[in-house]
Amino acid sequence: MLPLDVTPEQQARHDALWRKLNEPQRAALVAGLWATGRQLAEAGVRARNPLASEALVRWLLTAVIYDEATAQRLHGPRPLA
């Protein structure tokens, strides 16, 4: 199923370009997308919690990306500030 803002021709071009990439190029592209997504998520956490400590930002970011149980397992109880 195509996204609503993509024509079949655009999707075909995208698919052709993707197929031309070798495995390391694909991995690098995905890693870059992951890093960008993480930066955006962190910016959202900071915007919603402007007075948060670095520990709280790290905890909340983990909760956003994974879930609260994972944040507690990795970082301990949620910091107060």
Image (tube, rainbow, N blue to C red):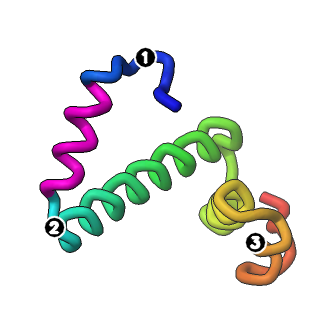
Helix, strand or loop for disc 2:
loop
State the separation of the CA atoms marked 3 and 1.
35 Å
Mark number, residue 22: 2
Q: Which label was assigned to residue 5?
A: 1
Q: Nearer the viewer, residue 56 or 5?
A: 5
**In the image, residue 63 above or below residue 15:** below
Front tag of 3 and 1: 1
Label 2 or label 3, whichever lies nearer to me, is 2
Is residue 14 visible from the viewing direction of this image? yes
Examine the image and state in which quarter residue 22 appears.
bottom left
Q: Is residue 18 found inside the magenta-colored segment of the image?
A: yes
Residue corresponding to mark 3: 71
Please provide percent x and percent y for residue 19: 21, 54
Residue at figure coordinates x 85%, y 72% from the top left: 69
* Gap in angstroms between the C-alphas marked 2 and 3: 35 Å
Please indicate whether residue 40 sits to the left or right of residue 10 in the image. right
Mark nearer the N terminus (2 vs 1)? 1
Q: Give, as a three-letter code, the residue at label 1.
A: Asp
Give the dominant element type of the magenta stretch: helix, strand or loop. helix
| Residue interval drawn in magenta | 10-20
Viewer-proximal residue, 7 or 27? 7
Which percent across, then down, holds residue 56? 71, 62
Res 6 → quadrant: top left
Residue visible at 63% across and 65% down? 58
Location of residue 9 with respect to 47 vertically, above or below: above
Give the mark, 3 or 1, whose residue is nearer the N terminus. 1
| SS at badge 1 | loop
Callout 1: few (<14), some (14-19), or many (20+) C-alpha neighbours within 10 Å?
few
Residue at x-position 67% and y-position 65%: 62
**Alpha-carbon span between mark 2 and mark 1:** 27 Å
- Residue 33's x, y, as percent? 37, 52
